[in-house]
Image (spheres, rainbow, N blue to C red):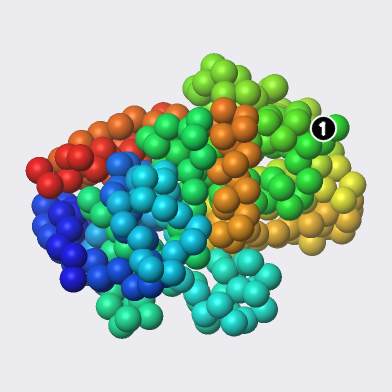
Amino acid sequence: MIPVAARSTASAGAPFVATTIERRDLGPKDVLIDIAYAGICHSDIHTARGEWGHTLFPLTPGHEIAGVVSAVGSEVTKLAVGDRAGVGCMVDSCRECEPCLAGEEQYCVKGNIGTYNAIGKDGRPTEGGYSEKIVVDEDFALKIPEGISLDVAAPLLCAGITLYSPLHRWGAGPGKKVAIVGLGGLGHMGVKIAKAMGAEVSVLSQSLKKQEDGLRLGADAYYATGDEGTFETLAGTFDLIVSTVSATVDMGAYLGLLKLDGALVNVGAPEEPLAVPAFALIGGRRSLAGSMIGGIRETQEMLDFCAEHGIGAEVEVISADRIDEAYDRVVASDVRYRFVIDASTIAG
Ligand SMILES: [Zn+2]
Ligand SMILES: [Zn+2]
């Protein structure tokens, strides 16, 4: 076993403390990554606070991981020592089911193996990126291209792919009008990526508080959903709406913003069921869909796309002592737009 400094929480809502976890010895297909940065995703917070109801404590979260390969197993071909590498939300899957064989491991019918808070194939709980090193099968490691620095690359591994996948799948591009609902960790990536794909991008946010940011990040227009008039003005406007909000919204109102054959794709996860008025779908042959991260192949494609277009996340780099404070600020939407932990501060 390889002892590794990490930050973990002992129970729901307990503060993060410095600790040591054990990574498995390298198997033939494993790579050891020295972590440089780990992003803080809202999912980390839900899990650490026990809000999703199935947390394995003690928990070391983190699934937006960027670093450098420091050792490789004997059969590794995809990465070499010194390569910049990342790990996202999954570290394994069954590899045999239809989604896995199609490269859509996130939809593995047996459930993908999460980077943390899951049981790995070795029977041990998986532990995430709030740590100095991680061991991962090369098939679930990503190459981080030159041209994106590691701090702004880390959040691409969850927030980036979560937006890239639906934008790509539903055809965001030249001539398409795309709206991103919510300008947070996910939404700000959506704006940058949709713009780089060539779409005309609007942000739909509760207020105009972040309008200046939204336009700077590449949005062509910015609208307040708190203003009733917005839904009248924009009726029938968009080809695609990607909603990143986890609050329950008026589905009929948002569906009404779609053109004929438009799609509303949810990547946020509201706790309550969404009430969908059927006529909002029927009139305009509209679709309502969901999307969850992306497969490994698509995640690599996203990283290459982001490097080519000079896209990284907007980050605030913090030391590991500030994780608890960062969590409170994320919950209060007080971050522009992603906290990233400097892994050199993890040992404390
Ligand atoms: Zn995430
Ligand atoms: Zn599978």
Q: Residue at x 31, y 82 (%)?
A: 123
Q: Residue at x 57, y 52 (%)?
A: 299
In the rendered image, the quadrant that contains the N terminus is: bottom left
Q: Secondary structure at mark 1?
A: loop
Q: Residue at x 23, y 50 (%)?
A: 132
Percent of width and height locating residue 342: 26, 38
Q: Is residue 243 visible?
A: no
How busy is the neighbourhood of tag 1: few (under 14 within 10 Å), some, or many (20 plus)?
few
Q: Is residue 2 left or right of residue 269?
A: left
Percent of width and height locating residue 197: 72, 35
- Judging depth in this view, the residue of 124 and 70 nearest the camera is 70
Q: Is residue 225 left or right of residue 69?
A: right
For ligand 1, tell me if the residue under mark 1 lies within 8 Å: no
Per the image, the residue denoted by label 1 is 174
Q: How many marks?
A: 1
- Judging depth in this view, the residue of 275 and 54 nearest the camera is 54
Q: Is residue 5 above or below residue 191?
A: below
Q: Residue at x 38, y 80 (%)?
A: 121
Q: Quadrant of residue 122?
A: bottom left
In the rendered image, the quadrant that contains the C terminus is: top left
Spot the residue most to the front. Answer: 74
Q: Is residue 81 visible?
A: yes
- Judging depth in this view, the residue of 69 and 302 nearest the camera is 69
Q: Is residue 224 left or right of residue 270?
A: right
- Judging depth in this view, the residue of 129 and 147 nearest the camera is 147
- Residue type at mark 1 is Pro
Percent of width and height locating residue 38: 33, 45
Q: Is residue 189 left or right of residue 277?
A: left
Percent of width and height locating residue 158: 48, 50
